[in-house]
Every structure is written in C-alpha cells, then in structure tokens.
Amino acid sequence: ATPTALLVGTGRGAQLGILIKGPQILESTRRVDTILLDKTGTVTTGRMSLTDVVAADTEDEAEVLRLAGAAEAGSEHPIAAAIVAEARTRLGELPRLESFASAQGVGVQAVVDRHLVVVGRPGWLTSNWGITVPEDLAAASDELEGLGRTAVTVAWDGRARGVVAVSDTVKSTSAEAVAQMKRLGLTPVLVTGDNPRAARAVAAEVGIDEIHAEVLPAEKANVVSELRAGGRVVAMVGDGVNDAVALATADLGIAMGTGTDVAIEASDLTLVRSDLIAVVDAIRLSRRTLATIK
Ligand code: ADP
Ligand code: MG
C-alpha cells in the first residue's frame, strides 16, 4: 500500500508548484545525484532577441533578414521567433511561405519568393545541402559565438549569403538554483544543441562546470544513458520537443510548465513556474518525505 506520507508529500509538492505524476516518483527524486539541464528555455528564458544581421559582400542585409524571416515563420523554435519578430519590425510584411520543413536541432528549409531558403547550422548547410560557407561568413559566426550568441547561416539558391545572430537571457533564479543544487551535493550538467561558446557563456554565468554542447536532439538521451552507465542517478530538466526522449530516459524527467506538451508528457515532474529553484524544492521535499517513513 502507498504510505500516506508519500501522498502528503505529493500534495505538498503541488502547493510548491511541483506537479508529481505519482507518489512513488518521490523515491526516484530522492536518489538523484546529477541534474542534467537543457540550456534554452530551461536555464535561460528562451525568449531570444535578434542581435546581428551580417550579409556577404555581394548581398544586402535587408534581403538576408527578409528571406530568413519569411522562412523562419514556419518554425516554432525560439531562434525563429526572434528572427521573424525583428524582420517584421524592420521590414513590415514578409513574403509568403510557399513550403516549409524543419530539421530538428539543425535548421529549416523553405520556399520563399521562388527561392529555396535554408537557415541553420553551417555544418548542416554543408553536409545536407552541399553549401560551403565562405570565409567571411564563417569568421562572422565565430566572432558572434565568441560573444555567447547563437549564429545561424542563411543561404538561398545554393549559396550562403548571410548570418543572423540571436541571444537569450539567463533566468534570474538559475544561478541561485545551481548554487543550491551544489550545496545539496548534486552535480549540475548543461546539455544543449547550441554551439560550445554560447553554452560556456551560460554555464559560466550560472556556475555549471560540466557541459555537453552541439548535442543533436536524438543524442541528448545518449548523454543521459552515458551518465547512468557511469553510476549516476540522473534527473533531466527540459522544455522542448527535442528533450522528450532524454526526459523519458532519465531516472527522473522534469519538464518546465511553459514547455511543450511532448516534454510534459515524457516527464515525471512538471514545474508550474518554470523556475529551477523548484527542482531543488522537489529534491528537498523527497528527502524530507522519505526520511519520515523509513
Ligand atoms: P537547445 O538544445 O539549446 O534547445 P536546439 O537543439 O533546439 O537547441 O537547436 C540547436 C541548434 O540548431 C541551434 O543552436 C541552431 O543552430 C539550430 N537550429 C535549431 N532550430 C533552428 C531554426 N528554426 N532555425 C535555424 N537554426 C535552428
Ligand atoms: Mg530547450
């Protein structure tokens, strides 16, 4: 029979803004020693804003922003939202999207004004589209990523023609939450599909020492499995469609309440306020609850 204490603990969790899928989950919560944190939308707000538009010598910045904005209108990614919002602000109505497809964790493709537009990671432009990124654009991306921003390359009709960069802000409570995790003896680890420099900038700001960057959506779960194989008991905290498999693979899956339905369904706990302090509250609650029923 389920001890009453577990039910009381689950109820107490709800009061703290932690929705627990079942009383037995408090047991796995208590055993966790490693917290794998997704970057975008979990440690950061995920509300990105556009910071830079760079055009290749032969191109026009407004055209880079116009076609990138039109193509990204088909995507729900925070990077896309930032590009579309700024493109609309600066240029007004954007050309209609004639067809669209996104490749999770790498970029988007669209037909706009009869151009085939591709926006995403430079490595994907090369490997999937055979587009080589010219020296000047690669250098611009490096410089922007060195500032902790996320740079994506914009190509159309088979040529890379520009770079746009976006930046995100760390949630006000993330650094305090990480400090509290460490005090409880937990090891925080950052995992992201983003570039290593953007990852390092965020990790440094909140006090995380271990980082896994440029992890494709399908590989996030492998990071969880490797940590588990090393004897760690892993909680994965995420918000995106790209986090779902990792959330399900972890000993404890924790979704942000502001996250996608897929992430919430794949997890054991949901944080109503999307604030990482609640992760610490959940661990404390599980320790207190289980201490009383030994
Ligand atoms: P995270 O793990 O931080 O949530 P994602 O896995 O969603 O990041 O994305 C990883 C990378 O894939 C981004 O940094 C970007 O380079 C590229 N990318 C993803 N979605 C898009 C998009 N809609 N447009 C352009 N690039 C994208
Ligand atoms: Mg995310």
Image: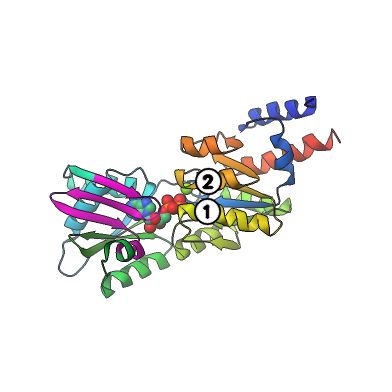
The circle on residue 220 is 1
Q: Is residue 172 something that shows in the picture?
A: no
Left or right, residue 11 beside residue 202: right
Query: Within the magenta stretch, is there residue 120?
Result: yes
Segment colored magenta: 100-125
In the rendering, at what x and y percent does residue 229 appear?
67, 57
Q: x, y percentage for residue 131?
A: 26, 66
Name the outermost residue toward the right: 294
SS for tag 1? helix
The answer to which quarter of the image holds residue 15 is top right
Left or right, 266 with reference to 107: right
Q: Position of residue 132 (x, y in %)?
A: 27, 70
* Pointer 2 with pointer 1, Cβ within 8 A: yes
> CB of residue at label 1: within 8 Å of ligand 1?
yes
Per the rendering, the mark at residue 263 is none
**Which is nearer the N-term, disc 2 or disc 1?**
1
- Mark 2 residue element: helix
Amino acid identity at mark 2: Val
Looking at the image, residue 287 lies above or below residue 66: above
Q: Is residue 140 visible in the rendered structure shown here?
A: yes
Q: Position of residue 212 (x, y in %)?
A: 54, 61
* Residue at the bottom extreme of this rendering: 135
The type of colouring in the image is rainbow
Give the CA separation, mark 2 to mark 1: 8 Å
Identify the residue position indicated by label 2 in the image: 245
Whether residue 126 is in magenta: the answer is: no
Q: Which quarter of the picture shows residue 20?
A: top right
